[in-house]
Every structure is written in C-alpha cells, then in structure tokens.
Image: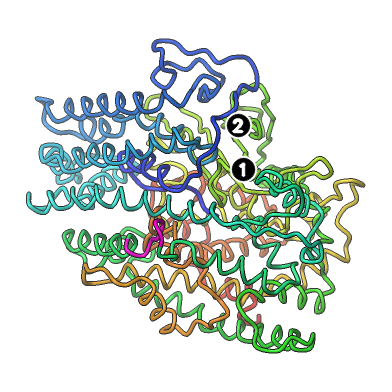
Amino acid sequence: MGSQVHVTRTLMRIALLFLIAAVVFAAAAEPERRQAGPASVVTGHENPLLAEWHTDFGVPPFDLIENEHYLPAAREAMARHAAEIAAIVSSPDAPTFENTIEALERSGALLTRIGNVFGAVNGAHTNDTLQEVARTLAPEQSAHFDDIWLNPDLWNRVQVVYEERAELNLNPEQQRLLEETHKAFVRSGAALRDDAKIRVRAINAELAMLSQQFGENVLAETNAYELYVSDTTDLGGLPPNLVALAAQKARERGYDSGWVFTLDRPSINPFLEYSPNRELRRDIFVGYAKRGDNDNEHDNKQILSRIAALRAERAQLMGYPTHAHFVLSDNMAETPERVLNFLTEVWIPALEVARQERADMQTMMNEEGIAGKLEGWDWRYYTEKVRNARYDLDQEALLPYFEVNAVREGVFLVANRLYGLTFHERTDLPRWHPDQQVFEVRESDGSHLGILYMDFFTRPSKRGGAWMNSLRKQSNLDGYVTPIVTTNFNFPPPTTDSPSLISFDNAITLAHEMGHALHGLLSDVTYASLGGTAVPRDFVEFGSQIMENWMGEPEVLRLYAKHHQTGQALPEELIDKLQASATFNQGFITVEFVAAAFLDMAWHTLREPIAHEARVYERAEMSRIGLIEEILPRYRSTYYNHIFSGGYSAGYYSYLWAEVLDKDAFQAFVETGDLFDAATAQRLRDEILSKGGTQPGMELYVNFRGREPSIQALLEARGLITK
C-alpha cells in the first residue's frame, strides 16, 4: 500500500526522488520501445529531459527518453538549481516573501521534473543502467541539497521573512508556505552551529548510501529464492490462473515442467493458503522471513543498526531526544508517547482475537490428524479452511467476479458518483511500458482535470507492492498547471487462457491507490509543494483508505463485480458471505501490522546513538509486547524497506492512524442514508482532498467532519469490539 514519499517542501521532495528510487529495484532487460501513438515532439535540446515538451497535456515524452539521458540531465538540472539558489542569495534587495520564499518554490523545477520521471520509471520498469544511475546520483544529490539547506546566507534571508510574517499581510496559503519553508530549513539543520552542520552533512551522506544498500540487499535476497514444485498434489486448490502463472515462471527459469513460486506476494501468499504440503509451506515461509538475515553478502543486520544509530545521533544534534520525537513533531500524532498509546489501544483487543483464531485453527489441524502445534507457515492455510467451514466461502469462487479491468471500472464508477469525474482512455499518449493504461480525467462539465497512468501487472523490472507517484503536481503560481499521476500494482498478469483475476483484497488495493490518485488529481492550491499528497505522513493515507470503504458495500459490489465470462453480477449469496466474513482473521491482520509498527518505534526511540544486534533487539522487543510466536511482524527488521529505505521511519503506524480517520469519515456518508451523498462528497472534496497540505491535517478533518475522529469506528470495523 501507500504512495511514494510525501513531504511538505519542494526542495526536500526532489532531494528524495532519486534517493528513494535508488534502493529496491531489480535488474532487468533494456526497456521495450514505449511508443503508444504518434511520436512525441520536443525542442530546444537533444536530451529530451532537458528539452521543451510539445506533448498533449505536457506528459513526459517517454518514447524519446533513453537510459543514457538521465545522468547528464540530472547533473545539468542540479547545476541550474544551484544557480537559481545563488541568484536568490546574491539579490541586492532586502528579503521578501516574493524574492525569497516564492523564489525558492520556483527553484529546482527542472530537477523536480526529471526526478519525477526517473523515480516513476526506475520504480516500475528498471534495469541495470538505471540502478547504476541511482547509485551514482545518491551522494551527489545528498551533497547538493545539503548545500541548499545548510547555506547560511539563504537561511538568513528565510529567517528575516519569517520574523516579519505578522506584518506581511499574507493570505492563509502564503502563511502556510512560509511556515513550512522555515520549518524545513530548521529541521535540516540550518540553525545549527558550524561543527554540527558538518556532522549532519556526513550523516546524511552515509544514510543515503546505507539506505540504498539496504534496499538492494532485500531485493537480491527476494530474487535469489525460488520454490520448485514438481508434484501437482502440492498445489492443492490453487486457482487455475495462479497455477498457470507458476508454470510460466518455471519455464522462464529454465524448467521443462513443474511450477515455481517466489517471495513476491502474488506468488507466496496463494501458495501458503492452498498448498497441503506442510514442509514446502515451511520452506517458503522461512525463506521470506530470513531475507537480509542469512549472514551472507546481502545481510542487513549491521546496516539497519547503523541507520538507526545515525538517525538517533542526527535527531539529538537537532535537539530532539530520539529520531521518533524528531519525525513526529511534524506529524498529526506529535509525540512517540501518543503513537505508542494508540498502538496499545488497538493491540490489546487484537491480540486477544488472534489468540482465539489460533485456537480455532489448532483444533482444526489436530482434527485432521496432524500432531503438534500450529506454526507460522500453517496460519494462512488453516485460515482458508476455517473461513470455508465457518462461512462456506471459498476465495477461489470469488475470483471470476474480480477481473482487473472490471474492478478498475468499479473504482472509476465510485469516483464518478462521488465527484462527477469521467475517465477517457488515451492510447495515443506515450508510456514507459506497454502494460500501462492512460486516462484523461475530466470534470462533470467535460473540462480537463488531469492525466492518470495505471500499471497493473507484476514483472521482474518492477518493485513489489503498490504505490502512487506524481509525474507533475497541480499548482497555480504561474498559471494553472494540471496534475499527472501514476498508480502502480503487482497483480497477476493475464495468461493465454485467462484474464487477470484478482482477489477481493487486491480490489481493495486498487481502490486504495486510486484514492491517492484522486488526492493528487483533485488538488486545487497555488503552490505545488503544498498540493495533493504533500501532507503529514500520518494523514496521507486518509485520502487513499477512505476509497476502500465503498468497494465492499453490497450496492457497489452489484455494480462492478461481474463474472468475466458471463457478465453475471456477483450472486447475492456470495455478497452475503463476503459481508459476514468481513472481520474474519482480523486478529492476525491487525497483530502483524501493529507488531511491525511497534518494531519501527522501537528502532527509532533509541536514545543512545549506538548499534544494536538486530536479531537480538528485535526478538526482545517482540517478546516485550507479547507477540505470539505463530505471527511474525508484517516486516522483520532485515527487510523492513518502509523504514530503512523508504519514507516511513517512525511512521509505519500511519496506516492505522489514518484508518481511524477514514472509518470515522465514511460514517458521515452512512449517516446520510446515501453512500454517495452529493453534499457530503462535495464537502470531502472541498475541505480535504482539494486542500493538500495548506492546513494542518486535524484542522482539515474537523472542517469536514465537525469534530475530531473516534477510534470506535476502527475497532468495530475490524471486529475487535462489538457494536
């Protein structure tokens, strides 16, 4: 889940684009030609990334961009950015909001454009060359942005404007931009002594390289594993489309027959759910759990311990007790204590439910004649057995009703009913991969709103998971600029015998990323750095997660869940079963998530900047919170990309935090008696989705809901308490 890195200032955002893109991507063949329609036209430079783009809606000319264009373009853009900063600093005029704050907002536009394109392509369709570009740029980018954030003359100009803010007669968005700009400089170390600034530079450079190495190690460990299956009985009830994909994977890896399963979620999870072979389940489960923890050249234990220590040291240089205090001071949660109290409030009932789930599965396993205790590799297998026995619901029976394009149309329908948006496929616009679908999004009056790229299928050149990128953010500083966003998934691709059929959970994932996309598309602000998803980390998932709520509602299921062969709507009997089982296995789902959130906080509330033995520290922390041994945290430390090579350090809790908001907010629609109530939808758009980060998150939420959210709706929705 989740979008890419969301920050509140343009400079910090483009600093991260190359660094985050560098960390986790697989080597692959050179990209195919990406042209979908007429060739793009660019002028002014032989490098298309540095040229003027004459494309419809200003989309990137992906058909003209080659691997060798990125490195020289990025370096040229950094040089131009440095010159723009020098011009601000050397201005003979006294600092003003216009010549300092807005000038900073305008600066780096070319680097932002290049970084957006590179980050999107490197994440979804990488190769050896792009990975090398990312590795080369990581230290250069770190130094470039430290030169900006730690520039004393630039900081002095920002400080002058900030101190005069009460007399400047700024509108609310201008005030917010000034506050966020000043805060970003402070949080980057601009106010530190010279010796501390030198140390911050060194820490930033080392962290950039360590984070990159961490992600590369996770990917190497993930790609190195395969489980070869030669006996059809070991497949159990695996759905035919997934059997076909496993057979295809085996051929790709040189086997003449049989099936291959990998550690990618679309491969490992179904195998754990359906294979009756307990030893094979154990093999792939342990393979997944041991990534980065095999004491080999890709081991991450020392790397992650060093990252945590460096973050602790940097936070203390900034005047904070821990890295978590530093991060959370700029989030809705504000303090580690508040996060830990929130997690504990969810953890206690979730753990109780998980223990009962374990007991139910233990009973079933023993009744089948299998001696001994339930293990982690048994959990998903017996979850499906208990689900089927209790609700007569076989997940395979649902698959034919969730063809990926039909689910896409369902998400489009929800967006149309809520906001009046329409989606028009544009096969003539350039793409970076043939799998991509491109849509022009229009308002109800037919006017252009933005462009949406959708990339559904797993492939070796794409990183795992699902996410949203902005290729161009909405702004209105120098004329109205419309947004261009991408959504990316790892769904099973179609085969010669079957379309892409996805699980109901994956249908929810599609809605989640579409929610991020709508947050970007519906933005209506002046400054790009405050637009769309540029909100605090623990508020950014609200826009995505609220979209999930509609997809399981019976009246919505009837509209989009259609059998891919017959067109028959999902039978009422299956809808009833899906509703009845909505809270099933929520103990496991919640516990594995909250355990990972606790683990994140444990690494980032360290008060001493010293390395810890990762395996020992993790085991002690999980024991301290009482995690049952049959459940692993969703991410163990050694493959926890979210916090060690992404933007979620001391922030993984935010998905659950945002769920409190989204469940409470969805009740605003339920309370009207109309899930698509026009007035409520308009208020959601006006008060939250269009506002970006122009106001604090809780202020936006209260403007919409009329009060702060209650955790009650979350606990009820997950079945952790009774209504």
For disc 1, the marked residue is 459
- Specify start and end residues of the magenta stretch as a single range: 296-302
471 vs 714, nearest the viewer: 471
Residue at image position (71%, 83%) is 361
Relative height, residue 455 to residue 49 (above, below): below
Relative height, residue 488 to residue 130 (above, below): below
Q: Quadrant of residue 370?
A: bottom right
Residue 699, position as x, y percentages in the image? 41, 58
Residue 589, position as x, y percentages in the image? 60, 71
Q: How many marks?
A: 2
Indicate left or right for 713 with 393 as reference.
left
- Dot in front, 1 or 2: 1
Q: The C terminus is located in which quarter?
A: bottom right
Q: Quadrant of residue 113?
A: top left
547 vs 235, nearest the viewer: 235
Residue 433's tag is 2
Indicate left or right for 15 with 574 as reference.
left
Indicate left or right for 266 with 699 as reference.
right
Residue 271, position as x, y percentages in the image? 70, 63
